[in-house]
């Protein structure tokens, strides 16, 4: 089962009903009772099926957030200004011919690589579809020629060893799945990825490592500081 929700939504919003909803790998399937999501364009108009767009919620629901403590302006700006009259999730999405919702990642995680818009979630999915890969996180780093370059942090399955040949194999695999422009410029093998205690990958830290920058910002939610130390010390 795959579900879609946010802390701000107060509960699961898009989900299969066990034993009742046919599932497809990679999709959270259909909205839960009373939830009205829609995929829209930049103007807030619904897009055709199998067309990428922004995921919004059109009507209120019982568990929705009611504000941001001490900052009502931020509440309005972040969640309600993007698409008038609708809750903006910040996620990119498409709806297939069966009405199933496919979340493709955060809108702000779409990179401009040599004039092409590439979602990091798409590249991560392509990497993980290789049977040798256990987990992957993709971030961007500044690049003089392309604007942004793709850097992939990859954790391999227990019986697989890293090698330059495997690095190239994974690059070619992504190129086959998505297209040549989506091939990661750099693939770094890691024993583990930096995560919060709830299991979310801290991509903010990976971006800083990829750019060779000093680690800044709050790291108090990091589950294992040794993971970050090993990644920072690893040879590129």
Image (cartoon, helix red, strand yellow):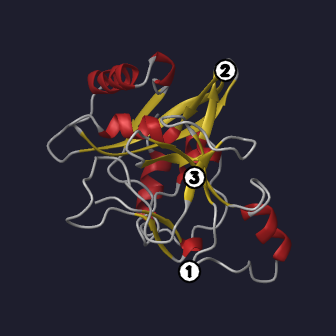
Q: Earlier in the sequence, mark 2 or mark 3?
A: 3
Residue matched to label 2: 115
Distance (Cα) linking label 1 and label 3:
18 Å
Taking depth in this image into account, of 183 and 101 the one nearest to the observer is 101
Distance (Cα) linking label 1 and label 2:
40 Å
Which quarter of the image is occupied by the N terminus?
bottom left
Q: Earlier in the sequence, mark 1 or mark 2?
A: 1
Q: Is residue 235 visible?
A: no
Q: Residue 33, how many percent across, how many down?
A: 44, 71
Q: Residue at x 22, y 37 (%)?
A: 132
Taking depth in this image into account, of 103 and 234 the one nearest to the observer is 103
Residue matched to label 3: 38
- Residue at the outermost right position: 73
Q: Are marks 1 and 2 in contact (CB under 8 Å)?
A: no
Which image quarter: residue 21?
bottom left
Q: Residue at x 52, y 58 (%)?
A: 202
Element marked by disc 3: strand
Looking at the image, residue 102 lies above or below residue 223: above
């Amino acid at each position: 089962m795959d579900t879609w929700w946010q802390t701000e939504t107060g509960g699961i919003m898009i989900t299969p009903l066990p034993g009742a909803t046919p599932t497809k790998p990679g999709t959270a399937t259909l909205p839960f009772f009373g939830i009205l999501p829609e995929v829209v364009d930049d103007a807030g108009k619904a897009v055709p099926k199998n067309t990428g767009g922004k995921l919004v919620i059109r009507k209120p629901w019982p568990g929705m957030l009611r504000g941001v403590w001490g900052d009502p302006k931020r509440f309005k700006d972040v969640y309600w200004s993007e698409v008038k009259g609708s809750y903006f999730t910040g996620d990119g999405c498409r709806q297939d011919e069966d009405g199933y919702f496919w979340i493709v990642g955060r809108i702000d995680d779409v990179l401009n690589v040599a004039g092409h818009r590439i979602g990091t979630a798409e590249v991560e999915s392509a990497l993980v579809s290789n049977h040798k890969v256990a987990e992957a996180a993709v971030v961007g780093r500044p690049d003089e020629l392309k604007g942004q370059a793709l850097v992939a942090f990859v954790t391999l399955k227990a019986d697989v060893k890293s090698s330059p040949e495997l690095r190239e194999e994974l690059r070619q695999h992504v190129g086959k799945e998505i297209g040549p422009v989506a091939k990661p410029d750099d693939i770094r093998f890691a024993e583990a990825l930096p995560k919060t205690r709830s299991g979310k990958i801290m991509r903010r830290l990976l971006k800083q490592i990829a750019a060779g920058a000093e680690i800044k910002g709050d790291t108090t939610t990091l589950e294992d500081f040794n993971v970050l130390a090993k990644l920072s010390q690893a040879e590129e």
